[in-house]
Amino acid sequence: MKAGQPTNITMNQTQKTKKGMNIMKSSKIILAFALTAILCLASFATAFAAAEPDPTTITKAAITKVLKTPYGTIIPAGMSFEFDITAISVDDEDFDGDEKNMPEFGTVAIDYDGSQNLKDPVPPGHTAGICTYYLESADIFKDAKWPHAGVYVYEIVEKANTYDIKDPAHEVMTYSGAKYTLNVYVVEDDNNAGKYVIYAIGDFRTLTDEGTQGGEKVDPTPGGDGKDYFYSQMTFTNTYVKTNGGTDPENPDNSTLSISKAVTGDFGSKTKYFEFTLTVTAPSLVPGTPTYRAYIIEGGKVVGDPVDFVSGTPNKFELKHGQKLVFIDTPVGTYFTVKETASAGYVPNIALVYDGGTALETNNENASINFGTDEFGHDYDFVGEAENTVGFTNDRNDITPTGFNLNDLPFIGMIILALAGAAAFIIIKFRRRNSYR
């Protein structure tokens, strides 16, 4: 063997080993790329599959009218709400107006005739002075005759001014600006060749009630899911606010809320003014921070200057016997608290009437105390559509026998002490004089 030959053989073997390692590295890289591609395709396929409608849940669609009103508002029978259902496209082609290609549904109406129970079942009653009512249509596609399989697209909006307001000065209806896009997936019925049925519905809120951009997916199934909600989530929310006053505060029929003062008892003063603090708060459905004006009525006539109350802000006023503070512009559902400042020697009580009902009365026997509507255990009281009054009666049936006012006792005590001191001085001086005789 020639000198150096073993070294060449070793170098060749090393080069072969490096080449094999490079091939293995390349194979690993190719395999990694392949796995990544497979995973990406799988993810894409999964995402694509997730976008498909769920055939087991949504095959019907109803419209729900949500009506929000301040607590105590009576909903007039005869309210009508209408919704335009516009055909947009079928299989990505704009609707050409031919119902042979795409059925039209026109206008769907929801009427309230006074007999339906609109009260929200979840939760019952009112929240924060607002009652929420629901009125749901039937399945809007129940009589549809689909001409063929495909994807049908519709848009649904509410028509404005469909309720005929009888008294514009006392009623305000705000309509919904919401818009929904429905993708209706139609397939041939497996059990009835040539007949086409809804496979699934995708419903999207594209505009909110305020008319701003939406994009939320909702469940339009009539009756909801029967667990968390009991109505179609394709909702259009309106607000309805009502007042029941007039323009003349001297007409007792125009009063929406009044606070009155009466004084009883042999020693009660009919000329004394008593101080009150009243907070009047507009229903939350009333926009802004309104100001309400009240008038002091005595003998059926306005006396003094009006008193303005900014919504939610306490304000003071004074009344004497036979006077009352009267509002004529507070909306139904306005809530209020009122308290009278303590008057020495007077026993206060209240009679509260809400919405023309039976008066709630207190039975207080303590004199000289602050006293208000919170004595009934209410955080606040509401203004209903009928009579709403708070009558304060202050009784002063007895008095200190001496005729002195108890508030004057500190001064009387000082006078007595002064007289006693003077008497003691005279006696001492008299005794000293006699002792020198």
Image: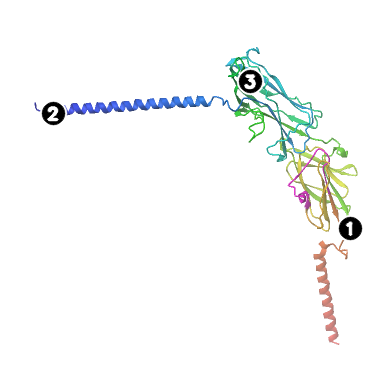
Q: Which residue is mark 1?
A: 267
Badge 3 element = strand
At which x and y percent is residue 299? 91, 44
Q: Dot 3, how many residues are within 10 Å of its Cα: few (below 14), some (14-19), or many (20+)?
A: many
Judge by depth and name the residue closer to the eye, 101 or 19. 101
- Residue at x-position 34% and y-position 27%: 29
Separation of residues labelled 1 and 2 (CA atoms): 136 Å
Q: Earlier in the sequence, mark 2 or mark 3?
A: 2
Q: Earlier in the sequence, mark 1 or mark 2?
A: 2
Q: Earlier in the sequence, mark 1 or mark 3?
A: 3
Q: Which residue is mark 3?
A: 154
- Which quadrant, please, contains the C terminus? bottom right
Q: Amino acid at mark 2?
A: Pro
Q: Is residue 104 above or below residue 362?
A: above
Q: How is the image coloured?
A: rainbow
Q: Dot 2, how many residues are within 10 Å of its Cα: few (below 14), some (14-19), or many (20+)?
A: few
- Which quadrant, please, contains the N terminus? top left
Separation of residues labelled 2 and 3 (CA atoms): 84 Å
Judge by depth and name the residue closer to the eye, 196 or 106. 196
Q: Amino acid at mark 1?
A: Phe
At which x and y percent is residue 248? 86, 36
At which x and y percent is residue 216? 60, 29
- Residue at x-position 13% and y-position 28%: 6
At which x and y percent is residue 351? 83, 48
Asked where in the image residue 288 lies, by quadrant, the reply is: top right
Which mark is drawn over residue 47? none
- Residue at x-position 88% and y-position 58%: 397
Q: Which residues are magenta?
A: 371-391
Badge 1 element = loop
